[in-house]
């Protein structure tokens, strides 16, 4: 998303060490230590202005949340919400979500959220979509066995692409919503973007998709 | 679908032995003999008034088509189209599509079409939906290894259900269309029902889903 450049944002993020992790690779495999508990860790890739991740953290104190947002001028808006909330179960990474495998150990993450990712509508840009197979491989690596992606978008083309991409990767679609806001789904936290586009009458699509169980985990049964 | 009862329809079907197969189980494993060629056999389950199956047969002379329609008063409308067409690559079964495994041998069918199947919207009726796992098992049995279902519907709930049902059965979604008539899909043959509901502005959903390769076929590689 485009927001005005904020030259002061980088400094503010760097100073807010309670919420912002500047060197996330240092915490690889040790995130529960950072949170000081053994709760599952759920990661939103592309957390934008932060409404989703902060509200989820408020609603679900039994889960630790980490938002990843590349754009500094956007990430600082999440930081403001985190500071205001005073919540201890949410953290922010101002970096590129494509590199999640650098920040999390195998199986360290309980769930991945993707909300209103960039649709990259031209077919020649399909490799940049966050539901492209190369990214799925990264998510699978950091997720627990059978871990899930929960994905929302208003973009029809991206949703069509992503359903096929998940399926062709070997993931199982647990449930699909083709008009989320007219469904009986409970507990939906709207992103800023979602509220705006839904109020215009656009449909919101949602899917929960699970990776296959990992072989190692199967052998432990 | 509901049409007026036609007491004469059963007799007309029984007499039209060129197009209607009254004892389909007798042809199990021998359908190519009946067509007199070695072309692949594509089956539409619930062929309704027949526009789809007859037009597909006209457009694709290299394929043999079989329509299955339970309702006699509806099936006779397909028969009229077949007679008018004079086509030799299409046949009609006036029976229950749920029993396809009684009519076709293992691997005898190249593709299954489901168009605008009854949505059975109440969740307690999910076992009657033609995309329920028990029916998928029948389709898998009669299909070639890696065979596909091509499914269209205007019913959002049935489509949501079916995507998850295909995926959870182990099928792979090859491609998904969330608004078929506004897509660049070519060669769509509209059913009578589809033309009516699309003209009202309803979306048409479509998916092509493939069964896993059969083990026997894999070993032949």
Image: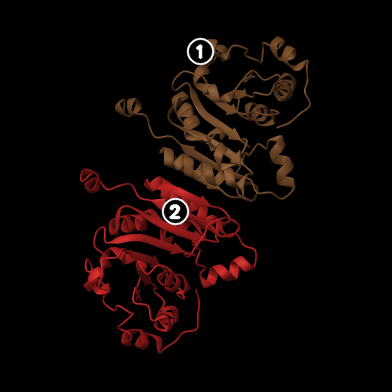
Chain colours: A brown, B red
Between A120 and A54, the residue placed more toward the observer is: A120
Q: Is residue B25 left or right of residue A140?
A: left
Q: Would you identify the image quadrant in which residue A167 lies?
A: top left
Mark 2 residue crowding within 10 angstroms, few (<14) / some (14–19) / many (20+): some
Residue A172, horizontal then vertical, whole percent: 43, 41
What is the quadrant of the C terminus of chain B in the image?
Answer: top left
**Are labels 2 and 1 assigned to the same chain?**
no
Note whether B165 is above or below B67 in the view shown: above
On what subunit does the disc labeled 1 rest?
A
Residue B179, horizontal then vertical, whole percent: 58, 56
Q: Is residue A21 left or right of residue B87?
A: right
Using the rendered image of the protein, determine whether residue A63 is visible from the camera's viewpoint: no
Q: Which residue is drawn at 56% across and 12% down?
A: A34
Query: Mark 1 and mark 2 in contact (Cβ < 8 Å)?
Result: no
Q: Is residue B71 left or right of residue A55?
A: left
Between A134 and A201, the residue placed more toward the observer is: A134
Label annotation for residue A30: 1
Note whether B156 is above or below B99 in the view shown: above
Note whether A23 is above or below B127 in the view shown: above
Q: Mark 2 points at which residue?
A: B208
Residue B75, horizontal then vertical, whole percent: 41, 78
Q: Is residue A218 left or right of residue B77?
A: left
Using the rendered image of the protein, determine whether residue B87 is visible from the camera's viewpoint: yes
Q: What element carries label 1?
A: loop
Q: What element carries label 2?
A: strand
Number of residue marks: 2
On what subunit does the disc labeled 2 rest?
B
How far apart in space, not on screen, are marks 2 and 1 (Cα)?
A: 43 Å
Between A75 and B5, the residue placed more toward the observer is: A75
Note whether A219 is above or below B83 in the view shown: above
């Amino acid at each position: 998303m485009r927001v005005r450049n904020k030259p002061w944002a980088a400094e503010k993020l760097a100073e807010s060490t309670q919420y912002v992790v500047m060197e996330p690779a240092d915490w690889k495999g040790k995130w529960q230590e950072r949170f000081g508990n053994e709760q599952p860790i759920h990661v939103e890739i592309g957390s934008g202005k932060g409404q989703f991740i902060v509200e989820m953290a408020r609603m679900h104190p039994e889960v630790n949340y980490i938002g990843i947002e590349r754009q500094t001028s956007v990430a600082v808006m999440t930081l403001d919400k985190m500071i205001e909330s005073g919540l201890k179960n949410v953290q922010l990474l101002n970096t590129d979500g494509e590199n999640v495998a650098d920040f999390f150990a195998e199986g360290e993450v309980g769930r991945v959220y993707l909300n209103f990712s960039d649709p990259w509508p031209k077919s020649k840009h399909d490799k940049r979509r966050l539901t492209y197979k190369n990214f799925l491989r990264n998510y699978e690596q950091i997720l627990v066995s059978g871990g899930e992606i929960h994905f929302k978008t208003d973009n029809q083309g991206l949703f069509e692409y992503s359903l096929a991409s998940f399926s062709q990767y070997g993931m199982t679609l647990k449930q699909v919503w083709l008009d989320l806001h007219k469904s009986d789904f409970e507990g939906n936290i709207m992103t800023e973007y979602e509220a705006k586009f839904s109020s215009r009458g656009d449909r919101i699509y949602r899917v929960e998709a699970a990776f296959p169980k990992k072989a190692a985990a199967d052998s432990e049964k």
